[in-house]
Amino acid sequence: MSVLSPVIAIVMTLILGAVLFTALGVNPAQALYVYFVEPVTQLWSLEELVVKAAPLALIAIGLALCYRANVWNIGAEGQFTAGAIFGSAIPILLPDWDSWMVLPLMLILGVIGGMLYAAIPAILKNRFGANEILTSLMLSYIALLVLDWLVRGPWRDPGSFNFPQSVTFSDAATLPLLVSDGRLHVGVLFAVLAALIAAIRLSFSVQGFAIEVAGNAPRAARFSGFSQKRITLSVFLISGGLAGLAGICEVSGVLNQLRPEISPGYGFAAIIVAFLGRLNPLAILLAALLLALSYIGGEGAQAELAVSSTVTRLFQGFLLLMILGCDTLIAYKIRLVTSRSHASGEAARG
Amino acid sequence: MQDLAAAAADHGVQPLLRADGLTKRFGALTACDHIRFEIQPGEVHALLGENGAGKSTLVKMLYGALEPDEGQIVWNGQPVRIGSPAEARRLGIGMVFQHFSLFEALSVAENIALALPHLPRRTLADTISRVSKSYGLPLDPRSTVADLSVGERQRVEIVRCLLQEPRLIIMDEPTSVLTPQEVDLLFVTLRRLSSEGVAILYITHRLSEVLALANHATILRRGKVVETADPAQETAGSLARMMVGSEVLGIERPPAVTGTRKPRLVLSNLSLSAEGQFGTPLSGIDLTVNAGEVVGIAGVAGNGQQEFFDAVSGERTAATDQAILIDGVQVGRRGVNARRKLGAAFVPEERMGHGAVSNFRLSENVILTRHATDNEVARGGFLHRRIARDVEERVGERYDVRRSTADPKAGSLSGGNLQKFVVGREIDRSPGVLVVSQPTWGVDAGAARTIRSALVDLARGGAAVLVISQDLDEIFEIADRIAVLSEGRLSTLYPAESLTMERIGLLMGGIHGEQAGEDAPAALKDSSHAS
């Protein structure tokens, strides 16, 4: 039953979507077609689908490791941004450096940036017991504002007519394409690679085992000799690194410059991807494609049906709500309790 | 049963409660199968049975926490449907649970007020003092529950129950956490209640208590009433036969190896801070466990057992390396896996969530304690699940772990079976030092015997075995030397032969001064509990 949960959630989301479009005065059948079918009918949009799914999958794989360990990293958006900023330092500060080393260095810096930024909530949690949900989320907004400041201030392209954007990256700082034209960059391969490695390590390595134990029974993890703090730090570092990698790939492979808005909420949408993919790295690849579909469908719907772009976010929100709802309702039964019988709740323990 | 009912009719007494064919099924399992029995007013009725015999299920139906599938409950001659514990309480049925449902951070009066919101708050403290004193259960309503001993916490539960003026009190294994002296005090209270006409349904698997206290015993086995007995006509042995269905054998315990005594586990001046707000700190613990012997640590729960286990296992490390020696190696500041590598093995009190992960298969639970020490189970950071499955298979067969499928999840096993697995998993490693906490907690007699023999055999094979247990019978059955843990301090080690139940009881409760002192001698005199 719990395997079916994502399927039920998707169907319910489509039904809710149809209701929403009807309320907006749009023909629901046409709207759903534009959203979910049209993008897969053309080659360019299929390619775009993969380009958008790649960062979602990279981030979601890292988040899945966190969530499996019962560590709630909600700040992937910030780690994504930190990775993009760190990696972009090379092409922005050394625009004339032309070497094969530029790109690998950028990627490594991107990973380090994401890791460092993710280390903050991990250390706060380990040292002071600070709730990582709050700290990682709040740190996201700080990262976004730092990026905003950089591209309006020190890193603004002097020749940009005051537009808040950095210089365009040189060829040496641009991720190569997989096929000669279009936008399919090699960053897509990182997502597939990360999924494979994560899947293997989760099932067969001692570290993967440690993550599972920590998530299922913290006391047993301690008994097994795994340090909860070390696990918390390591899953934060891995997921931060993957989010940072996604960030620098997005900037280097798609945008080619830093701007105030480099992500349409990938870091948050990846939370949905992680749960839709049952926290399973391979299934996350599929889930990422579905979420990417909602982004592209949303753009199409804006153009063809004149519905607001916020509808896309609504859709994503519906989806998360439905998945979590399905998971909860499959595992638990609803029982209405009046205040009178509530007082006797003590006996329910027995 | 007929003759019982007839006898009741003869005396013109209506039974207070009659269970009439109560049946409860969980899937394929029939937990209670057409249970019939009666309780007269003022009677102490023992409900006797092994774990899994259906005692708890039956009681939950009587207390309204479970709905019977078949049959009915007749209360004072009227068939009643008890839909919730609140309804049970309205009828006059009270219950004292095995595990307490108290808020540690609140005072006695606050805890009682929470459960009984209709009582007037202003006079509640006085009422509690009065009622508790009149039943020989003195309580200070203003004291914080966290500061109370386990026996005192039970008093809170009992007083809370008495304030509802019940006509039937159900007690689920009330003595499992008490010292022998506290048990005697409890019995005085129960006899007094019974003389006032309050019926008591007393659930236990301790035969001596049935003999000492009960007027009637109903014996359950596999969900059925197999026997009703008059305890006055029975002996502990005959009751045990009814309960288990066959002769219960003691375990064989060859004498401990004397002569060269090699210390394998040595604790010297071991101290540890309390875990959490309500833990008990350990101070200055000295202990030597030699090869070939079983050492038992007796004591009432909450006297530092958790901290003691954590310190010895290395889940929490000590301040100095010298505090703990395993086979002469200083390990005080080293973790659990470093100690396992030296040949130590550990079984914690809590099986689920500590000794095993319920969501994991048994083979994965093998990995849990072996990934750092067994080169076959994990090598170079990678797991060999097939080998873990072989271990699971071996432990399962050797220790008779009944599994419904091959390699099931730990959570699907019954408590006793999982306990056999968790203990067997460690003994299978042939450890040099084995530390076990509550080895047979909630385990039926057959499984307990398997586990206890395995522990003794391991020791006689040259290992040092340290058993932490609240069950004095168990400690006397397997331990060669005994120490008592009380308020985080360990007594000196006594040879088991030199100790009596009474003496241990004094060591267990002696340090904790309570008002009970004045009542204790009287209670001891008419005690028939001590074995």
Image: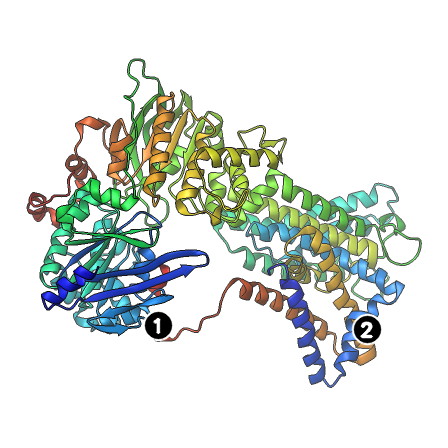
* Chain on which label 2 sits: A
Q: Is residue A164 above or below residue A92?
A: below
Pick whichever, A285 or A74, lies toward us.
A285
Q: Position of residue B152 (x, y in %)?
A: 21, 52
* Chain on which label 1 sits: A
Left or right of B127? Residue B469 is right
Q: Is residue A102 visible?
A: yes
Left or right of A260? Residue B77 is left
Q: What's the amino acid at mark 2?
A: Gly
Q: Is residue B236 above or below residue A245?
A: above
Determine the secondary structure under disc 1: helix
Q: Is residue B141 visible?
A: no
Pick whichever, B92 or A94, lies toward us.
B92
Left or right of B26? Residue B128 is left
Q: Are marks 1 and 2 on the same chain?
A: yes
**Looking at the figure, which quarter contains the N terminus of chain A?**
bottom right
Q: What's the amino acid at mark 1?
A: Ser
Q: Position of residue B44 (x, y in %)?
A: 16, 56
Quarter assignment of residue B494: top left
Rate crowding at label 2 as few (under 14), some (14 to 19) or many (20 or more) other CA atoms within 10 Å: many
Q: Which mark is residue A277?
A: none
Farthest residue, direction top: B259
Residue holding disc 1: A341
Residue holding disc 2: A300
- Residue depicted at 19% across the width and 42% down the height: B236
- Tell me how far mark 1 sits from mark 2, CA to CA: 53 Å
Rate crowding at label 1 as few (under 14), some (14 to 19) or many (20 or more) other CA atoms within 10 Å: some
Q: Is residue A160 above or below residue A31?
A: above
